Amino acid sequence: MSDDLSIQLHWQRVEPELKPGKFSNEHLVQFDDTHELRVDSAPDWGGKAGNTNPEQALAAALSSCHMMTFLALAAKVGWPVASYYDHAVAYLGKNPKGQMSVTRIDLNPVVRFDTGFTVEAEKLAEMQDRAHRYCFIANTLADSVEVNVN
């Protein structure tokens, strides 16, 4: 398998001891040796608000994958997409086993086309549905994704 799909993660304890609730989860994630992201627990779990948390990163991965899949499909049928915006929201809760998990991620994509080009709302919804079905990340997450076409 290629390293193109890998990351490097580094965490170092800064406290004298590792005690429950008394240590920082802040760490670095490196992508392709070119950039890094400071990651922490979500603020509700004691993390710093200025850092990315794994739940946000999961929503970002899904949103990004969905967009790239949508753009590939739109290009195949000749839709001149000018811009794409999404506000993805991850929700925490308990799964059927009673474990904490990301129970749902909502995608709220807004697609704009070149001037003079329009697509019927039904056709746009169909294309978003296809993008969802073909997105690798969505397929990994199974039924916990909702796409709200705007």
Image (cartoon, rainbow, N blue to C red):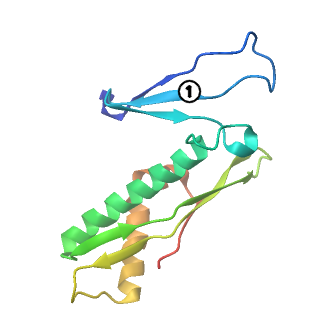
Q: Position of residue 140 (x, y in %)?
A: 50, 49
Image quarter of residue 132: bottom left
Towards the viewer: 97 or 22: 22
Q: Quadrant of the N terminus?
A: top left
Q: Which residue is drawn at 35% across and 68% down?
A: 84
On screen, residue 19 versus residue 12, left or right, reads right
Q: Can residue 139 be seen in this view?
A: no
Q: Position of residue 24 (x, y in %)?
A: 68, 26
Q: In this view, does 113 lie above or below 52?
A: below
Image quarter of residue 6: top left
Q: Which residue is drawn at 47% across and 30% down?
A: 29
On screen, residue 93 versus residue 12, left or right, reads right
Q: Can residue 137 be seen in this view?
A: yes
Q: Which residue is drawn at 20% across and 69% down?
A: 76
Q: How crowded is mark 1: few (under 14 residues within 10 Å), some or many (20 or more)?
A: some
Q: Where is residue 83 in the image (x, y as percent from the top left)?
A: 31, 70
Considering every residue shown, the one lying at the far front of the view is 50
Towards the viewer: 27 or 140: 27
Q: Mark 1 points at which residue?
A: 27
| Mark 1, secondary structure of its residue | strand
Towards the viewer: 11 or 3: 11
